Image (tube, helix red, strand yellow):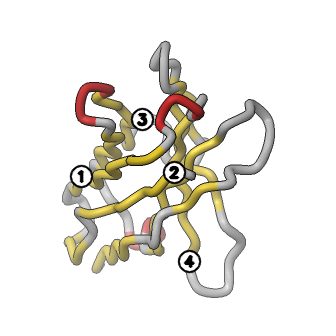
Amino acid sequence: QVQLVESGGGLVQAGGSLRLSCVASGRIFSIVTMAWFRQAPGKEREETATITWSGGRTTYADSVEGRFTISRDNAKNTVYLQMNTLKPEDTALYYCAARTYYSRPPPYWGQGTQVTVSS
């Protein structure tokens, strides 16, 4: 099992920044990638950013490319999502997730942290 705990959400004005953190514990060795998903009311869950646990390779959704940066600190078992130039449409519940196999849905999820961007 892998446990994930997010923090760092909050209320911010449009154009502002926030940094989310996700601390992993448990069977860390089983993780191959970490990702940040988000889900806004009435919308489907969207995978916004992903990073490989060992090599640090990153991928981004078009909606956040150039504004969000995912990173990890393996020594701290922590993944970050730096969100800049936030827009009201970035308002959502953000989840951290861990994959144990590439190209499969993540089996491990955090509880979510709310990000609200006011206009």
Label 1, label 3: how far apart the Cα atoms are: 15 Å
- The label shown at residue 40 is 4
For image coordinates 44% across by 66% down, the residue present is 90
Label 1, label 2: how far apart the Cα atoms are: 22 Å
Badge 2, how many Cα within 10 Å: few under 14, some, many 20+? some
Using the image, determine if residue 63 lies above or below residue 113: above
Q: Earlier in the sequence, mark 4 or mark 3?
A: 4
Q: Earlier in the sequence, mark 3 or mark 2?
A: 2
Secondary structure beneath dot 1 equals strand
Front-lying residue, 19 or 33:
33
Secondary structure beneath dot 2 equals strand
Amino acid carrying mark 2 in the image: Val
Badge 1, how many Cα within 10 Å: few under 14, some, many 20+? some
Q: Which residue is mark 2?
A: 2
Disc number lying in front (1 or 2):
2
Amino acid carrying mark 4 in the image: Ala
Q: Which residue is mark 3?
A: 66
Q: Position of residue 89 (x, y in %)?
A: 47, 70
Front-lying residue, 55 or 94:
55
Q: Earlier in the sequence, mark 1 or mark 3?
A: 1
Q: Is residue 78 left or right of residue 50?
A: left
Q: Are marks 1 and 3 in contact (CB under 8 Å)?
A: no
Task: Give the quarter of the image for residue 80.
Answer: top left
Q: Earlier in the sequence, mark 1 or mark 2?
A: 2
Disc number lying in front (1 or 3):
1
For image coordinates 68% across by 77% down, the residue present is 43
Q: Which residue is mark 1?
A: 19
Disc number lying in front (3 or 2):
2
Q: Earlier in the sequence, mark 4 or mark 2?
A: 2
Q: Position of residue 113 (x, y in %)?
A: 37, 71
For image coordinates 24% across by 34% down, the residue present is 76
